[in-house]
Amino acid sequence: MSAILLDTGIVHYEVIGRGRPIIFVHGWVGSWRYWISALQAAATSYRAYALDLWGFGETAREPERYGVDRQIELLDRFLNEMGIGRVALVGHGLGGVVSLLYASRFPNIVDRVMAISCPLEFSSLHQRLRSAPPAELAEWLLARTPDGDAARADAAKTDPRALAASFENPDSFNLGSRFRMGKTPVLLVYGQTDPAVNVPQFDPLLMPDMLHSIYLEQSGHFPMLDETQRFNRLLTDWLALESGESPRDLQLKEEWRRRVR
């Protein structure tokens, strides 16, 4: 277990591997722990970090820091304290919101973003996600598997106030206009059967050059747990793209061709 002190609060993180930095940011259910397999996949060529946001996992309970803007500040402070420069971000749910907003504010720092199960507007969030306690959300969204059970155990550590505060500013979730004209490569990944976030549909002809979406048909809200091997292949292929290269180039591999419905 590793931790740094930001002002008076302890921020927990884990890190493995060597190379360029990549940061994994968890969502509303669980903590850093459900990234273990993805961390191992990334660590073959990257220095892979996973951290716990305020009020989640082993990071301090600091209610005044639970809003989305303060979680973004946590990410920024973490990068500065660790001496991390240009970075790839992988965010899930709330972590996807934090990662996309951070990239929109600091495009010179973020090399690329993978946002998983990430709402692009407030109305795409299921009401249950915004109102149920952490343990109930874990039962709803996590499969009964060893990895799911580990994430379920960590979900019990979540401060319910951290969940509530993350939804206080609906404008934080209106993400589409923030990155459609940006130069940061963004890959959106969705589980086709996600019950918590409405899966957006895009017209490929109207998508910006640096934006691409991929749907995993056998996944719900946790693609990294529901289809672990396939998700890790996608992660590895995405990381193998050259800096500044559009994630649309993943289409060159038959497996990642976008399904047009």
Image (spheres, rainbow, N blue to C red):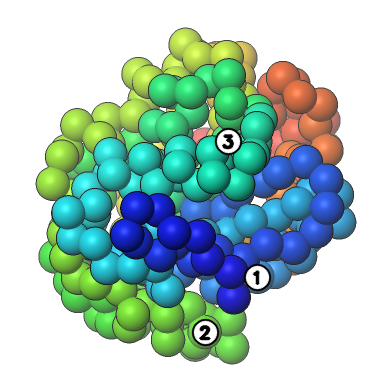
Question: Cβ–Cβ below 8 Å for labels 1 and 2?
Answer: yes
Three-letter code, disc 2: Ala
Three-letter code, disc 1: Ile
Is residue 113 toward the left or the right of residue 19 in the image? left
* In this view, 231 is above or below 108: below
Mark 1 falls on what kind of element?
helix
Residue 81 position by quadrant: top right
Where is mark 1, residue-wise? Answer: 36
The answer to whether any part of residue 225 appears in the image is no
Q: CA gap, disc 1 to disc 3? A: 19 Å
Where is mark 3, residue-wise? Answer: 113
Q: CA gap, disc 2 to disc 3? A: 26 Å
Q: Residues within 10 Å of mark 1 (few under 14, many from 20)?
A: some
Where is mark 2, residue-wise? Answer: 150
Q: CA gap, disc 1 to disc 2? A: 10 Å
Q: Residue 231's x, y, as percent? A: 68, 57
Is residue 73 toward the left or the right of residue 207 in the image? left
Three-letter code, disc 3: Val
Residue 12, which numbered label?
Answer: none
Quarter of the N terminus within the rendering: bottom right
Q: Earlier in the sequence, mark 1 or mark 3?
A: 1
Q: Residue 54's x, y, as percent? A: 33, 60
Q: Residues within 10 Å of mark 3 (few under 14, many from 20)?
A: many
Q: Residues within 10 Å of mark 2 (few under 14, many from 20)?
A: some
Mark 3 falls on what kind of element?
strand
* In this view, 107 is above or below 99: above
Q: Nearer the viewer, residue 259 or 209?
A: 209
Mark 2 falls on what kind of element?
helix
Q: Nearer the viewer, residue 250 or 89?
A: 89
Q: Earlier in the sequence, mark 2 or mark 3?
A: 3
